[in-house]
Amino acid sequence: MKIVRAKTAGFCMGVSLALRQLDAALKTHEHAGALQRGTRLATLGPVIHNPRVIAEYAEKGVVCLNDASQARHGDVVLVRAHGVPREVEKDLLERGATVIDATCPKVKKAQLAIAAERAKNGGTLLLYGEVDHPEVKGLVSYADGDARVFLTCAEFEAVTLDPGREYFLAAQTTQDILGFEAICARAAERLGHDVPMLRTICDATRKRQAEVLELAREVALFVVVGGSNSGNTRRLAEVAEGQGIPALRVEDAGDLDPASFRGVAAVGLTAGASTPAEHIDAVETWLENLGASPA
């Protein structure tokens, strides 16, 4: 069985930066003996969408807060790569926490672009993304809450558009580029004119999805490694399936079943932006051993 591993698989720049900031904060925290004094090092929500990575940091004493209201005076709280709404960061500071902003630079750029568009022209944000995703909630806050969020063309069709109102378009940074382009074209049709579009989908997402499209020409099955709660991992699988190639989403090699690969001559291997290289390596080794086994 041939195994084709995507060159872009694994951590993106934003995830790497966030984890480096968390590692540096953990080192400083431990050196100062703050853990023993009761001052906590925390993240607001999981720093990245990978349950296994989060569990490793929990073992080191990093607390995962579900809400800003759980922050205590003196806590050091790292804002994760997805970013947070502006009012949440303000809440943390008012509670006496020290905030480390580990928002992905691409997400921060999207936040500022949305804020700039609102300040310049006003208008309502039409946002292509997952309404409950932490990044989306942050992006909406930079539009002053004046936004309509949708994930599918059907959801967009259900959005009431007022021809007399100004709109602008943006997307969650990890969304499907082809889907966003389709939404932009449909918005122009519905309103009768082009709608200002902010190019907020990050290069890492574009490259990963483009590579899946390319590899789909030479494989019969994809294995996509990543956290079960990772949106960009899910979308890589959806891109493959959109080309008629089945995709198996797994968190590690233990989730794989040899029966899934019977009769498969070539398998593609890719991974979400929150997947450590060692997790991908382990899956690749499992596949190699499977391919080397007698039929």
Image (tube, helix red, strand yellow):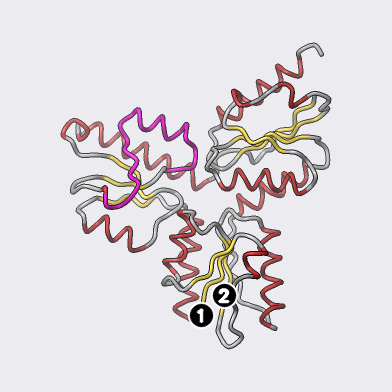
Which residue is disc 1 drawn over? 123
Q: Amino acid at mark 1?
A: Gly
Which residue is disc 2 drawn over? 168
Name the foreground residue: 20 vs 56: 56
Q: Residue furthest bottom?
A: 164
Residue 119: in magenta span = no
Total numbered labels placed on residues in the image: 2
134 is higher (above) or lower (below) than 265:
below
The percent coordinates of residue 130 (x first, y second) are 54, 57
Q: Residue furthest left?
A: 37
The percent coordinates of residue 253 (x first, y second) are 61, 24
Magenta range is 47-69
Answer whether labels 1 and 2 touch (C-beta < 8 Å).
yes
Q: Amino acid at mark 2?
A: Phe
The percent coordinates of residue 286 (x first, y second) are 66, 20
Name the foreground residue: 77 vs 242: 242
Q: CA distance from mark 1 to mark 2?
A: 7 Å
Residue depicted at x 83% and y 25%: 263
Residue 57: in magenta span = yes
